[in-house]
Structures are given as structure tokens and as C-alpha cells.
Amino acid sequence: MRVGIRGLPAAIPGALSHWRDLLLAAGPLLLLGAALLVAAYLVLQPQPPRRVVLATGIAQGAYAEFGQRYAAWLAGHGITVELRPTQGAAENLALLRDARSGVDIAFVQGGADPAGDAARDADAGLVSLGSLFYEPVWLFYREDSARRLARAPSISHLTQLAGWKLNIGAPGSGVPPLVQLLLEANRIDPATIALSRQSTTPAVVDLLEGRLDALVLCSAPESSMVQMLLATPGIRLLDFAQSEAYARRFAFMSPVVLPRGVIDLARDQPPADVRLVAPTATLVARESLHPALMQLFVQAAQRVHGGAGWFQRKGEFPNAANNERPVAAEAQRIYRNGVPWLQRYLPFWLANLADRMWVVLLAIGAVLIPLSRIVPPMYEFRVRSRVFRWYGRLRDVEHARGQRRTEDLLAELDEIERHVGQVAVPLSHADELYALRSHIEAVRARLQQQAPVSAEGDRPPSA
């Protein structure tokens, strides 16, 4: 086997030299591509933050329950969801509008805005990620209060609440502004009702012990307090006979029906359909929330709220309808096209990176492909220069004939030949290397032909 540089087989130095030349020729182009890719990554920030703050609601409420389900689902994708307990939807909105609160996303009940405040959301940069579920208005009242105050076993209209002790929820929840709208729509003077603003748990205790005649909750049926009151003897639920009219008056409301027997089929509870009015709960986020997180929250909403329930059929929620705020483009994309194709087969972080960087990669390719035409000439130049630089030394030796001693020129020629023997070039350029060697031999032959003459001329003249 022929041996090349430092005892390596001759093919190895040639291969190494080929790849080195190719890398050096394409190096500037690769560095430019890497710089553009890094710059695009820093500008686009395709990977979302690993922590997000979700404002929920009171303990044991539906928002708190759903928040825990969201956190568990997103944890499977490497996202930590910090749950921020609040009094409810109104406080959630205030936190979203406050840039210093640290809240990124929140559950918000329809109609929770005081009059005129919804217009502020555009300035605050708030967007909806979709409607999640119905939040019926549950007006629970004591049967004995109805007999005592309304002179009837049950009530069917809000105007019958005059003189009652009614709790409308703690400040910060979405219930007080909603009840205010309902009272105004029925032309009821709030002064005719003894309104209190306790949080849910103490209000329920007062209702059960008779210190309150009625209370209003606005929550999904998953709320433990709603479930308990529905099953409590002596507590009745107001049937909103005018539910369709309320839905026509307020765009954020929908008429819903609590079906007969849905609470307990065996006991036939409730014994008849109960008509209710229901604002729609939405997921509201800051517009600055990372798009990938918006996608994940919508997917989590589909998992948590997509099933059948007391008031909706399977697949009815979440959706992009009944929103008081513009729906984010990322949410619309999920509702329109479903889960991104790559996320069905790849881990979330990798699918998200590819999904958000492919346009950039195409743009970088469009820039680099025309520039790549300079790589072959650069490569050609580097390989040929490795051979041609020795032609300069060879020419100097040839031009020095007759000016320097032949023995010195032959020694220099041997040194050139030794270096050329260590030059490695690809097979496609081997002809140039062999041509150089043949030219070295031609110059050596000329030097050797004049060697006797030079030797004769080198003897000192005779006396």
C-alpha cells in the first residue's frame, strides 16, 4: 500500500484535504446562513416561555376547577401554569388590563364589564381565545321566603324580589355588574331590595341558615356550590320564563334549559325543565401572549370543555362565537384547521419550532442559493492554487540556470519535489499534480545536461 502524509494511506489525506477545501470555500456562506438564522430566531422567538399566569376565581368555584385541569394538561407539554385565585371575572379583567399584575390569561364571564369598559380592551391589547362554556345565572331562593314575601310557593320573575335580602356576589366577581344590568332591564329600583355583597361560601351559609332569602351565582354546573344547592331541600331555583327575551336584549347571553332529570335521573331532579339565561365564559389573553401558548390553551380548552354537558352537546364548545372581544388569529387557526399537522406526530417544542421557522428558512434559502454559485469557483481556486504555487518556485529554479551553481539548483529542485509529493488533491485534479511532477523532471533533465559544462566552468583558470 502506498503511504502518504505521516504514514496514513494515500487516499486519506486526499479525502481530508477535499473536505477541508470544501468547508473553507463554503465557510463564508455557512456563516452568513447561521447568522441570519440566529437573528431570525432572536426576533421571532419561536419557543414560548415556560411559565404563564392564569387568573381563575374563588376556591371551589368552576374557574378554579378548570384552572387545575388546564395546568395539568399544559404541564404535559413542559409549560408551568401558575393559578392566581381571584374574586371572579371583574377582578380578572382588571388584572389583565394592568400591565404590572403579571397575569397573562384569565377566565372572563360575559357581561362582567361595567358599562363602557369593554371599549378599553382594544387599548389594553386584550383578545379572546374563544367561548368555553355557558355560565347560567343561578338564582337560588328559600321556599319559605317565597311563601312569606311573595305569597306564593315559588317565584318566576325578578320583580317579585322586592323586599328580599339578596346576595349578588363579592366585589371583583362578574355577578354584581350582571345583576345590575338585569335589574335595570326590569326597571327595578335596587333600593327596594336589601342587596349584600358577600363571597360565595359565607353567602351560602347565610342562605341555608335563613339570614338571606336568595343569592345569585353565575357559574358552570361543575361548581361544587351549585351542585350542593341544587340538591338541598327547601332551596328552589328561579325559572327564567323570559329567557328568550333576555337573550335578545343582551348579545352575550343565551337561553339555556336545565333538562328534566339531568341532576338525578332516579329521583327525577329537576322534575321539570328549568329555563335559565347564561352568559358565555371566555378565555381572554393579552395580545402579547406568545402565539404558541395561545394555541396550547385553545387545545387545552378543547380537551376540558369539548365534551357533552348539562347545557351543551359534545363538540359545541369551545368556539369563536359570542365573544365580546376580537378572537386571536392563533385561536381562529385552531378552530378552522384543528391541531397543527406537525404537532400530531412530533413533540410540541419541535413541531412549534418548525411551524414558526419554515417561512424564515425559505427566505434564507432564497438568499443563499444564488450566493452558493461562488462556492464551486472558490473550491476550484483553492485546490488548483495548492499545485500552481509550486510552479513559481519551479520557474525561479529554471531562470537561475547559469547564475547559480547547478548542484544548488538540483538540491532546491529535490526539495520542491519532496513537498509536491506531499500535496493531496482530489482525483478530479490529479492530472494537474502529475503535470507538475513531469515539469519538475523536465527542468531536472535540463540542469543535468548542463552539469558538465557548469563543472568545467567552475574549475579555476590555469596559470
Image: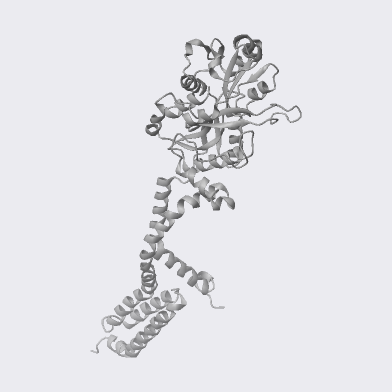
- Nearest the camera: 360 or 131? 131
Query: What quarter of the picture does the N terminus occupy?
Result: bottom right
> Whole-percent x and y of residue 192?
50, 10
Query: What quarter of the picture does the C terminus occupy?
Result: bottom left
Quadrant of the rendered image containing residue 27? bottom left
Which residue is the extreme one toward the left?
A: 463
Answer whether residue 332 is visible to the viewer in this image. yes
- 139 to 357, vertically: above or below: above
- The residue at the point 39 percent across, 34 percent down is 122
Which residue is the extreme one toward the right?
A: 266
The total of numbered circles placed on residues is 0
> Whole-percent x and y of residue 32?
38, 57
- 381 to 155, vertically: above or below: below
- Nearest the camera: 35 or 263? 263
- 442 to 89, vertically: above or below: below
- The residue at the point 48 percent across, 44 percent down is 332
> Whole-percent x and y of residue 359?
43, 54
- 395 to 12, vertically: above or below: below
- Nearest the camera: 337 or 413? 337
Answer whether residue 30 is visible to the viewer in this image. no
> Whole-percent x and y of residue 70?
58, 35
